Image: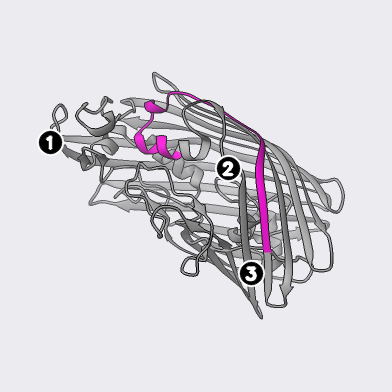
Amino acid sequence: MKKLLTVGSALMLLSTSAFATQSRLIALGLKELDNEGSYYIQDNRNIFLNAAAVNDVGDSIIMEYGASGRLLSSNNTSVEQLDQPKAQGGFFKKAGEYTYGFYYGNESNTSSLIRIASSSAAAISLGGVTAAGPTSPKMLATTDNQLDIFFAGTSGDYKWGTNLLFASSKDDVNLKKDQALAFRLGLKANSWDAHLNMSILGKAESTDTITSTYTGVAGTSTIIQESEGKLGIHLGGSYNLSSEDKIFGYVKTFAWEQKDNYNAYPMPNELAGNYVAGGQSGTVKGNFTTIQLGWGKAAKVNETGTLFTSVYARHTAIDLKFANKTEVRNLVLPVTIGYEAVAADWLTLRGSIVQNIIGTRDNKNFNSANAIARSLVAGTYGANGKGTLNNSTEVNAGATLTYGKLAVDGVVGVTSGARNGSNSTATETPNKTQGPFALDNLASKVAVTYNF
């Protein structure tokens, strides 16, 4: 599923069903790990936030261009990034007062992060180990082959919606499998909305044979690794202060257990950079909790333009209960200003700027986690230690090209490092998109919506 350009569109001139992709929301300043939707911007992407929004999506096809995302290992372990998106898409149909639909490939980055954090540090560190680190780390597979089934309807002044999510994959040759099961319930009234999204099954298992020739770790070892989700809840909603203003909030929390049968140890000193394995044998418990409260406004400023503004406070806490517990503590208070306008009957432009007024971190014991988890967490939540979150200013831009009932969305951006945005090793900090854009790399995320 790929992500490309998004730069604006006036909601009053185009039907709401023209807005149905991550690209638009990212261009308007969305900063969420899973890009599930917005509480104050009307967009069909909101079906992954509140299933009742499916009532507004009927009679459409959505396709988000991409591939496998950023692959982190040979075990089908991946995450989605703006410059390395995953393919996804779906179909929605009205049937009287009801709406139903199917959507493929909307795998959660939160779920992927949990699987990555649960992966054996030894299996990662000894996977094709070289003096510079692992070249083929062995990890738990992230969720794959995901299918979302939606069904929604209306009852008086209320809109309701349900969503069942399941995913499963198995590799008997390489002794790997994963399963996921979750549901979403949503309700929308004239002045408020609420949702309960719950993960009830999330499990991945892998058995890997690792061979190393380095001093102190020579020989062949069988490593059994497992991640089992215990509970995942995303509870939230919003309330209309006026026709333009909303207050909103949510709590998202996950608990899991990760198992590793291999004793953890540091890599030998002769390896460049004193590469550290991290991890811990046995069972380790983990928790991930995010709490957010905020205000957002969508105000029409002229016949073709809409101004979007928001401010919210979000606290994130992650714990991996090793002997030396890994902790992530983030508090951010970003202000977002976005604008979109119809430039022509075939072109809508949008853009945004976001900056943290408050951005603090208090992170501890990253070296207890495996090498790839350390890299991803540092790239998302800041480095190990206590301080501020640096370089929080972000400018995004995008566009929608409209051809009758067909709309093409995209987010403008190019990649740092290699032009294709790839990383030379799995443990590198992910590349960031940055300008200026070029004709051979105009957008880093693209999607198509067709309304019939």
Marking on residue 400? 3
Which residue is identified by label 2?
198
The boundaries of the magenta stretch are 350-376
Which SS class for mark 3? Answer: strand
Badge 1 local density, few (<14 within 10 Å), some, or many (20+)? few
Disc 1 residue type (three-letter): Thr
User: Would you place residue 421 above or below residue 115 in this image?
Assistant: below
Q: Quadrant of the C terminus?
A: bottom right
Marking on residue 213? 1
Disc 2 residue type (three-letter): Met
Asked whether disc 2 touches disc 1, contact meaning CB atoms under 8 Å apart, the reply is no
Which of the two labelled residues, at mark 2 and mark 1, occupies the earlier sequence position? Answer: 2
Question: Which residue is more in the foreground, 15 or 171?
Answer: 15
State how far apart marks 3 and 1 are (Cα). 54 Å
Which of the two labelled residues, at mark 3 and mark 2, occupies the earlier sequence position? Answer: 2
Badge 3 local density, few (<14 within 10 Å), some, or many (20+)? many
In the image, residue 444 lies at what x, y percent? 51, 61
Which SS class for mark 2? Answer: strand
Residue sitting at the far right: 242
User: Is residue 363 shown in magenta?
Assistant: yes
User: Is residue 335 shown in magenta?
Assistant: no
Residue sitting at the far bottom: 404
In the image, residue 13 lies at what x, y percent? 77, 71
Toward which corner of the image does residue 261 lie, by quadrant?
A: top left
Marking on residue 42? none
Disc 3 residue type (three-letter): Thr
